Image (cartoon, rainbow, N blue to C red):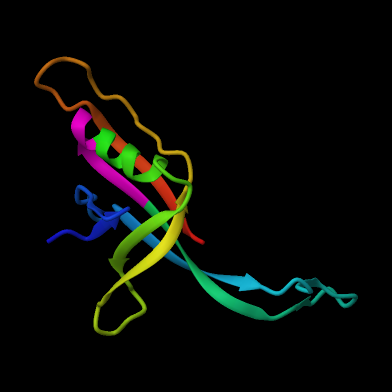
């Protein structure tokens, strides 16, 4: 079963245990910060997902597919399982990507090309 779609395309499954790390980050109001008593003040105006993805071993074709999904346009969709939903439902969010990393393992024919490819996506 696929666990991640980017820009409508099914992505290779990331590795367990740390293939996908989903963070639900608070977005604070403009008045947030330290007050005169050094206590933090402000209001949370919403929450946004940040997803760190790491793939174990990928081929040249797979890395090209990931790159195309995240670089064709600045904002795209990500579909993933919402860890905060008790039923484990998939959600689809509009996101943008940080710079993908492609650690080269080998260019020798027959060996894996890339190991530990990483990507960070952030909800818009």
> How many numbered marks have been drawn onto this rendered protein structure?
0
Is 56 colored magenta in this rendering?
yes
46 displayed left or right of 43: left
Q: Return the x and y of residue 48 as percentages of the image width and height.
A: 50, 68
**Region in magenta:** 53-62
Q: Residue at coordinates 16% horizontally, 15% vertically from top-left?
A: 108
Name the residue nearer the viewer: 31 or 34.
Answer: 31
50 displayed left or right of 33: left
- The extreme right residue here reads 36
- The extreme left residue here reads 110
93 displayed left or right of 112: right
Residue 59 visible in the current orientation? no
Determine which quarter of the picture holds residue 111.
Answer: top left
Name the residue nearer the viewer: 65 or 42.
Answer: 65
Determine which quarter of the picture holds residue 73.
Answer: top left
Q: Return the x and y of residue 24 as percentages of the image width and height.
A: 47, 69
Q: Is residue 61 above or below residue 76?
A: above
Q: Residue at coordinates 32% horizontally, 81% vertically from top-left?
A: 85
- The extreme top residue here reads 108
Is 77 colored magenta in this rendering?
no
Q: Return the x and y of residue 78 as percentages of the image width and height.
A: 35, 59
Residue 46 visible in the current orientation? yes
Q: Is residue 41 above or below residue 65?
A: below
Q: Main secondary structure of the magenta part?
A: strand
Q: Residue at coordinates 38% horizontally, 44% vertically from top-left?
A: 70
Q: Residue at coordinates 74% horizontally, 79% vertically from top-left?
A: 42
Q: Return the x and y of residue 2 as percentages of the image width and height.
A: 17, 59
Q: Is residue 122 above or below residue 65?
A: below
């Amino acid at each position: 079963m696929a666990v991640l779609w980017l820009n409508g395309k099914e992505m290779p499954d990331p590795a367990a245990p740390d293939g996908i790390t989903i963070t639900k980050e608070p977005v604070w109001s403009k008045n947030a910060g330290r007050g005169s008593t050094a206590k933090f003040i402000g209001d949370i105006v919403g929450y946004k997902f940040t997803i760190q993805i790491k793939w174990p071993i990928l081929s040249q074709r797979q890395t090209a597919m990931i790159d195309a999904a995240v670089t064709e346009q600045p904002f795209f969709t990500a579909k993933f399982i919402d860890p905060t939903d008790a039923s484990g439902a998939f959600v689809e969010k509009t996101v943008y990507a940080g710079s993908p990393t492609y650690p080269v393992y080998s260019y020798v024919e027959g060996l894996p090309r890339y190991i530990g490819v990483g990507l960070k996506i952030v909800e818009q």
